[in-house]
Every structure is written in structure tokens, then in C-alpha cells.
Amino acid sequence: MDTQSDHQFPITRTDEEWREMLTPEQYQVMRRHGTERPGSCALLSEKRAGTFTCVGCGQPLFVAKTKFESGTGWPSFDTPVDGAVEESRDTSHGMVRTECHCSQCGSHLGHVFPDGPPPSGLRYCINGVALNFEPAE
């Protein structure tokens, strides 16, 4: 599945530009819909107030107060910033899931599942390599 070919995003780059700006792991996750190894991201234990932004374009995606410990090994959030995350159907690996990606640059972030806490009841399971963290001032 290639989200980039399905929709025109406000921020676009060539494949070469993406490869130059992202690490190999970020490129594999964000542009090729890969998944980082569970438990491998330093942002998994991030508990400070602040904002999680897209590595690909800097757009704010999640505020820290929506982050929770899901026990999955990936940073999990119950609600994205309004308009920051779009969803699409993902039928890869013999499953039907809901992929989530950045609304500005189309970078793959992870998947959303209906087993999160209130108030949304959703769990946005996000690859930490797709995120930067900006602490609140």
C-alpha cells in the first residue's frame, strides 16, 4: 500500500529527498509502511508535557496529555491534534487494519485500534521513529 500515490498532500518530496532527510529506519517506516521493533523507541517512556510532531514535516500530531501506556511497546495516544492525522484502510500482512498517516506529508505513522481508553476509546499505536518531541516551555 502506498498512501502517497492515493492522495496529494500539501507537503511533497521526491523519493531521493526523503532518503536524504530521513534515517534508513525512518524511511522504511514512514515512506515504506514499515514498523519499528517494539520497545526500541526512547519516546516510549517520554512523560513530560509537550507536543509530538511529524519527523517528515514538523506538523504537531499529538499532545503529551493524550499519551498513555498501552503495554504494546509503541507510543500510544487516544486522540490526535485536530486535522493532523488521516486514516486509510490497510490490508497488508493478511489483516484489515486502519493505517494512520500525517495529513501534511502523508508519512506513515502507525495504526489506530478501537481498544483505547476514554474519552475516544481509540489507541493510536505510533512508530516512535516517525515522531519528534517538543517539550512545553
Image (cartoon, rainbow, N blue to C red):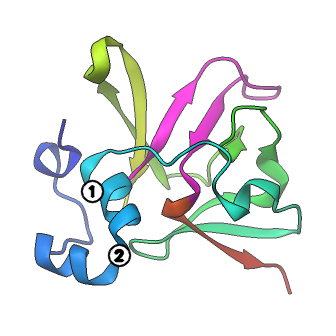
Q: Is residue 106 visible?
A: no
Residue at the image position 68 percent from the left and 47 percent from the top: 39
Residue 112 colored in magenta in the image: yes
Residue 89 colored in magenta in the image: no
Q: Quadrant of residue 44?
A: bottom right
| 49 vs 127: above or below | below
Q: Amino acid at mark 2?
A: Leu
The reply to whether dot 1 and dot 2 touch (C-beta < 8 Å) is: yes
Residue at the image position 86 percent from the left and 87 percent from the top: 137
Measure how far apart labels 1 and 2 are at the Cα level.
10 Å
Could you classify mark 2 by the number of other residues whose Cα lies within 10 Å: few (under 14), some (14-19), or many (20 or more)? some
- Left or right of 8 on screen, residue 93: right
Q: Which residues are magenta?
A: 107-128
Q: Specify which label sits upstream in the sequence, 1 or 2.
A: 2
Task: Tell me the number on the disc at residue 22.
Answer: 2
Looking at the picture, how far across and down is residue 21, in whole percent?
31, 82
| 136 vs 105: above or below | below
- Left or right of 49 on screen, residue 52: left
- Left or right of 75 on screen, residue 4: left
Task: Tell me the number on the disc at residue 31.
Answer: 1
Observer-nearest of 6 and 107: 107
